[in-house]
Amino acid sequence: MTAAPSFVERHGLWSDTQRAAARHALQEISARGIELVRFSFADQHGLLRGKTIAAAALPDALASGVAVVSTLFAKDTSHKTVYPVFSAGGGFGMAEMEGGGDAIIVADPTTFRVLPWAPDTAWLLCDAYFPGGKPVPFDTRHVCRMALDRLAGAGYEFLAGLEIEFHVFRITDPHLRHSDAGQPGEPPEVSLLSTGYQLLSESRYDQIDPVMEILRRDLAQLELPLRSFEIEYGPSQLEITLSALPGLGSADAMVLFRSAVKQICRRHGYHATFMCRPRLPNVMSSGWHLHQSLALRGTGANAFMPETAGEQLSRVGRQYLAGLLEHARGASAFATPTINGYKRYRPFALAPDRATWGRDNRGTMLRVLGGADDPATRIENRLGESAANPYLYFASQIYAGLDGIVRGLDPGAAADTPYDARAPMLPRTLEEAIACLREDAAMRAGFGDGFVDYFCRIKEAEIARFNLEVTDWEHREYFDMF
């Protein structure tokens, strides 16, 4: 009797390349004595969730996928369920989201990695589907793939290089008492590894090198395209850069990088955080500078590289740049999706406060690098925070840039003094950013009304919780005065 086709076969979810990668992964697991494989997917916040599968059960998990509760797509950053999932349609107007039923995460075998810090453990990144085989529309990797497909239809491929700033501290109290638990729990108490304020200082680098060496060794074994290891401006602040990869590969690298850094550091008694501006004395904000360009499909040539000496960008590059400017306010919720991240947008702080562009100017939102005869010509967007979901950040850039190309927009003159420029101000709060996103026609046309409204509702739940909290600022401001 012929066996019934598996979930993957029935719905045609793998390419020939993925099927070959699955066979290779099984061979590697057997040869290396791997005992556990983590099936992970990136949720709406860009955080990895999933299940760990015993090696003996792996062939079936690869063929049939792994069931996870669909409420994972309904949660805010405190892990609280925002949508009424036990009502009709689960609050989404979708029968598949009712009652906390299953979603099926299906591994992408091309993402197989052996985790160097976790004994006998491998990892696979997954895509999410409903049991009927339809992609979960809130799966952000799927959302990014749709944006990349639209870009491919226009004849281009998205390339991204990453500059990621973050902090690493030594844990002095992990706060694991019962009273420390909650939604969210009490974060660890930490101390500095360096006092900072010596940008790119070799002495400061040497102070933090023991941590850098741990990270470098393990990240290299993950085959991430590591480029540089740097001391950033603030105390205990680091920057690691990754070389350019095609769009989905670069987004995958970002989620793996962030998760790996946090896990590696924690196992060695350190706390790594990609929070933009921790509430600690003297620390600096961390940003994520996204270097992006378009390659022509077929030839791989850089579509941003101009042909005429003295020009910064090609015609297509200028139009793409203009689209990023046009939709900077609408896209900011994807680039900076946390309440905390908007405390970074301030003048004279190597961070943007308005939608401007300039040639090699770190005060602008968009920094243009390269020129004629430079195949590395690109646009650096300095808008994002390191906590952003890379799939949504990339998709927002693609939809904004494509709108600029389709409409033939012009970016105008460069801003030589960006903090004095007459240009639209970036949102000052996540609440303002969400309002801008709701009104942005290109973001709605690209992501779809359903996804935009879903994302805004998730974020508005976080804003509502924040507005109910009594902050230290309020206590200091009012407790004695009134």
Image: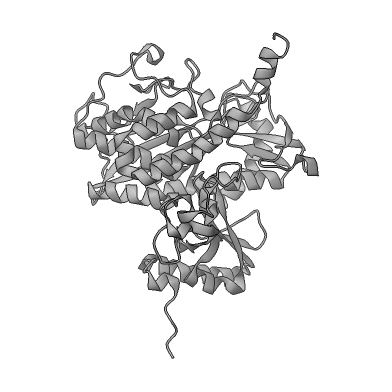
Image quadrant where one finds the N terminus: bottom left
Colouring mode (rainbow / by chain / secondary structure / one colour): one colour
Q: Tell me: 269 left or right of 376.
A: right
Residue at the farthest front position: 88
Residue 429 to residue 23: above or below: above
* Image spot of residue 246 (x, y percent): 37, 48
Residue at the farthest top position: 481
* Image spot of residue 226 (x, y percent): 50, 44
Q: What residue is shown at x 44% (from left), y 49% (from top)? A: 140
Q: What residue is shown at x 37% (from left), y 34% (from top)? A: 438
Nearer to the camera, 184 or 277: 184
Res 390 → quadrant: top left
Q: Is residue 127 visible?
A: no
Q: What residue is shown at x 23% (from left), y 52% (from top)? A: 298
* Image spot of residue 154 (x, y percent): 22, 46
Nearer to the camera, 220 or 315: 315
